[in-house]
Each structure stands twice: as C-alpha cells, then as structure tokens.
Amino acid sequence: MTTELHPVLKSVTDRIIARSKAMRAEYLARVERYKSREPRRKKLSCANYAHVAAPMTEADKLALALDKVPNIGVVTAYNDMLSAHAPYYRYPEKILDYARHVGATSQVAGGVPAMCDGVTQGKPGMELSLFSRDVIAMGTAIALSHDAFDSALMLGICDKIVPGLVMGALAFGHLPVIFVPSGPMPSGLPNPEKAKIRTAYAKGEVGRDALLAAEMASYHSEGTCTFYGTANSNQMLMEIMGLHVPGAAFVPPRGELRDALTRAAVERAAKASALSDAPAYMADVIDERAIVNGVVGLLATGGSTNHALHLPAMARAAGIILKPEDMNDLSGVVPLLARVYPNGSADVNHFHAAGGIGFVIKELLSAGLLHGDVNTVWGPGLAAYGKEPSLHDGQLVWVDAPAESLDLDILRPVTNPFSPEGGLRELRGNLGVAVTKISAVKPEHRVVEGPCAVFDDQDDFLKAFKENRLPEGDFICVVRFQGPKANGMPELHSLTPSLSAMLDQGRKVALVSDGRMSGASGKVASAIHLTPEAVEGGPISKLRSGDIVRVDCENGNLSFIGDEAQLMARESAPRPADADGLGRELFAPFRRLVGEAVSGGSVFW
C-alpha cells in the first residue's frame, strides 16, 4: 500500500518543480544530447582511443574493444591523511578485479583534492575549505571529460568532497554514477568525554598533554570520524538520495561485508551502465524529489548545517533551485528521529547498531515524509533503502531493517520523536537571514538577548576569552568578515569550547556570524551563514560592542534591538587587512573570483 505524501512535502516539492522548470529543462536537454547507447570510447579517434587503452593489460585492451563491455571510470579522493579516505588505497585494484569478474573494465579517471577540516580548523588553510568543494567539482568533471566511460564510481566521504563529487558528476548526468563509501572507524573515546576535556583545556584546567591524549583516543584508526558531522551527514544523504548501494553508509572498513558492498557497487555500475537495457542515469536519480528527500533526511537526523550550503549547490548542478524557505518549511513538519553526537552522546556506530539509516527511511516512508517513487542507482523506488545488508553463507543479501528502534535514547519512531520538528531553522530579522541548528541546543539556551561583543576575527575572540575581557553575564558573540567574499567562509569550530565553557558557568551566550560552524558544533545557539555578509556592507558590519541583539531560535528571529534607522545610518566597519598566510595571501585572487561567482549565483544563504 502506498502512503499518501504529507501535504507540506508535496507543496514544497511542487513549488521547487515550478520554480526550477526552465533551468531543469535546460539541464535535461543537455544530458539528452550526450546520451549514447554505444560505448563512448567508440566516438574517439584511433589516436585518442589508443591513449585510453595504452596502460591497460592486453586482456583488458581486448575487452575494451568489444562494443558491449562497459568501462567504469573511477574518480578518487584518496589520500592517507584523511582517516576516512585512507582505506581507498586498494580500492582501484579491487574495483578492477571485481569489474573483470562481471565482464567489465575500469580505470581511474582522475583524483581530486581532499582536505581535512579537522586539521585546518582555526588555521589559514580553513579559508580554502569551502572553495575546495568547487575545485573538487571541477576536478571531477575534468576526470570524466575523457569521454571514455559508460558509468562511474565516486570514492569520497568527507566534508566538501562528496558535495563536490556530486556537483561534478551531475555535469555528466548521462552516465550512471554510484558513490562508494569506506565506513566509520571503531568507536573510541566517547564524544562527550572528548568535549569535556576540550572545554577544560579552553578554561586552562588541563594541559595540552591531556588534550592531545583525548584527541588521539577519539581519532585513532582508519575510517570516518564517528561523530555526526558533515562527513557522516554526507553518507546519510547518499543513501536517502539513492546514490549508494543500499545500506552501505555505516558498515566498517576492512571487513567482508564492506568488500561485498564495494563489489556490489562495481557490479551495479556495470549492469546499469549506459550500455545496458535499463541504465540508471544520474540525471534521473537526482531530481526534485531526491533533493527534497535529502533535506528531509538532514532534518530527521539532525545533520550538519553545512548542508544548508551544499544541498542548494548540488541541486543547482542538476538544474534545481532549492531555497532557504523550502528547508525551513520542511523543518516544521519533519520530526527529529536521531540523537547522535553532537546532538546526543551516541556516535554513528551506535546509531547504526540501533537501526540506522534503514530504520529512519522506513519510518519516514510510513509517514509520507519521503518520496518513495524516486529512481535510485539500485533501481526504481526507495523501499530497498529501508533494508540493511548482511552476509549469509558468504553471499550478500538484504534483510528488513529493525521494525523497532533497539535504543530509544538514540533512535525513535515518527510516533515518538525527540522533537516534532527538524534540527535546522531559518532566522530572519533586521540583521539579515541566517540558519541555526537547534537539535543540539537545550531549550533554555535557544533564546538569548543581551549586549554583543564584536570581533573581526575568531582569534581576537579567543584572546579576549583567555584574558577575561568578555562581558559579564549574558551576551552575544559576533564574529564578522567570515563570509565567502571576505575570507572563504571558514568554519569557526575553534570557538565552540570557549563558548561552551561559558554556558557551563550558567551564562546565556549565542554566536552570530556570516561564517560557518563545523558540522560537529552544537550546544550553543548559533546564527550562522548570515547574509548579507559584512564585506558587502550587511547590517552585521554596523554593529558595535554593547549593542543589544536578540537570537531567538524558537521563533526564527535575529534582530538588533534599538533604533534600526540609526543602526543603518552608521558607517560599516572597514574590512580587516588581510593577514599573511596560505588562505588570504596565496589564494587571494582565487578567493575573489570564486567568491563573486558562487555568492552571485545564490548558492550561499
């Protein structure tokens, strides 16, 4: 029996379809022009074709010469500095072996950069983090531009990498594209314990040796970091948007089940290639319904605020216009079903054991809160993603996800959610438009009004905190000139321990910024991605320390309290002089060019 769609889900989807009609039609027409039912390599000249085949074995060259043998292009974000990507070291070799077993060939089409936000937090390199998404998108398109592939596999997991791979792959929507994860690392030091030590270090109560020991116990192995930040939110999205083999997201690395899922991805890439009778073109998988499903999944699981930026960008790459009000309206009806750190004490391994994404998808489908009739890389319909993979006698099979949550402190049904509303909200007021994530913020901390302390750099705030120069009592921390045009919109996660320490003292504090917070950030009410940004003369550029500001996450309001005309009559604060360093000096021309392009294209809030 088909469950009737929730009226708000239907209404939001319908208006996205109507709004996107012209752009989507143009995108689909371009895809249609590039579709081919014969091997794309056959369109190459003999010299071009020889270059494609030159490094292959003689057996693979002979296979490649056959008309019905699919050639699978692999785009990899491997490096051995990212724990999540280190397992990819052997994947190209495995993929080629698996491809040969099903009568296909594979080639690494290219590699894309994969920077670690955990390494660059609070450092100049973080100013390149968001822009790396667009570099990855371009690198993906360049890799696939050889026009020698009949389907593609994307090897990437972490923060900007998956969105960039999606955007680049969508330029080749005439190909079937499957995302291949590697899974989370085993659970280490519990995240709440790690957070306590970070806060204690910020307060000067423990030394760097204790902090380092805690961090090393948390990030200790190959695999994705186990908190529910942007990387694991990416994996949830790839499941719920139908780009994974069902159930692949949170299976650990280096096990038989993980290998079987990778093999299944290769087999599917061959079976559903552009040469097949039923190709799973990426353009058909990522449509308006899939984008709405992604938003719903983000809200229901309390995912990363970074996807308030990435989902609209991914949608645009498919000719779809997703707006803040779409997310906000969906947040009003999508219940919060998961509490995973920073929204709770559990990590993604605990979430997976409690029922995981399969349980979440089943629950949302039962409530009419997902489009179940979508296309996926696995075939028509989302129902397959309400199952979980298992090995029976060495064979990969799928069984129903648990009918009930195995831990109600981590995962709940739609009839008994943690909250009747989703984790993200839009804030509007005379300071502009911002986004907040309230799923990790206690109700008593969601509304803060008080004098603001204004900083033009996060390091200035941290220095003031250490020197006890911040206002006493409740206050609003304003950190500006952190938008995409100013310095690349770095994450400001380094603020979290200090702000959390003040909350622990019984004070009410909030953050207002035109920058971003990490997907791992929570606890403190934060109005982020504020637009217009300070460098464009937005109202945040006119604030002065001592002004009264109200951050009301309950009612969606962000406002200067006082004479608004007087505020707007003030001169904007001058943009701080660029400091020396990788992010601001070396890549300044690149920042200006890309900042103007992406913000002008309404990708950012």
Image (cartoon, grey):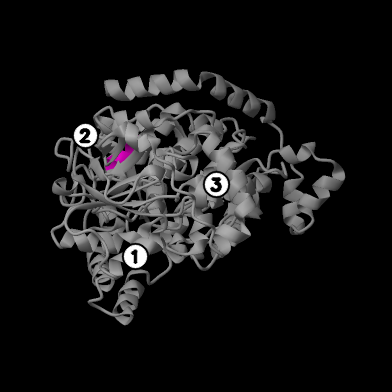
- State the residue at coordinates (80%, 52%): 51
Image coords of residue 557 (percent x, y): 26, 35
Crowd class of label 1 (few under 14; some 14 to 19; many from 20; radius 10 Å): some
Q: In the rendered view, tell whether residue 539 sits above or below residue 463.
A: above
In this view, the residue farthest toward the right is 47
- Determine which quarter of the picture holds residue 220: bottom left
Distance in Å between CA atoms under marks 2 and 3: 36 Å
- State the residue at coordinates (42%, 30%): 323
Distance in Å between CA atoms under marks 3 and 1: 35 Å
Crowd class of label 3 (few under 14; some 14 to 19; many from 20; radius 10 Å): many
Q: Is residue 593 magenta?
A: no
Give the mark, 2 or 3, whose residue is nearer the N terminus. 3
Dividing the image into 4 quarters, which one contains the C terminus? top left
Where is mark 1, residue-wise?
462
**Contact flag, marks 3 and 1 (Cβ < 8 Å):** no
Q: In the rendered view, tell whether residue 362 sits above or below residue 59.
A: above
Q: Is residue 297 magenta?
A: yes
Closer to the observer: label 3 or label 1? Answer: 1
Give the mark, 3 or 1, whose residue is nearer the N terminus. 3
Where is mark 3, residue-wise?
165
Q: What is the three-letter code of the residue carrying label 2?
A: Asn
- State the residue at coordinates (33%, 35%): 566
Closer to the observer: label 1 or label 2? Answer: 1
Q: Which residues are magenta?
A: 296-300
Q: Secondary structure at mark 2?
A: loop
Where is mark 2, residue-wise?
555
Distance in Å between CA atoms under marks 1 and 2: 30 Å
Q: Secondary structure at mark 3?
A: helix
Q: In the rendered view, tell whether residue 69 sits above or below residue 182.
A: above
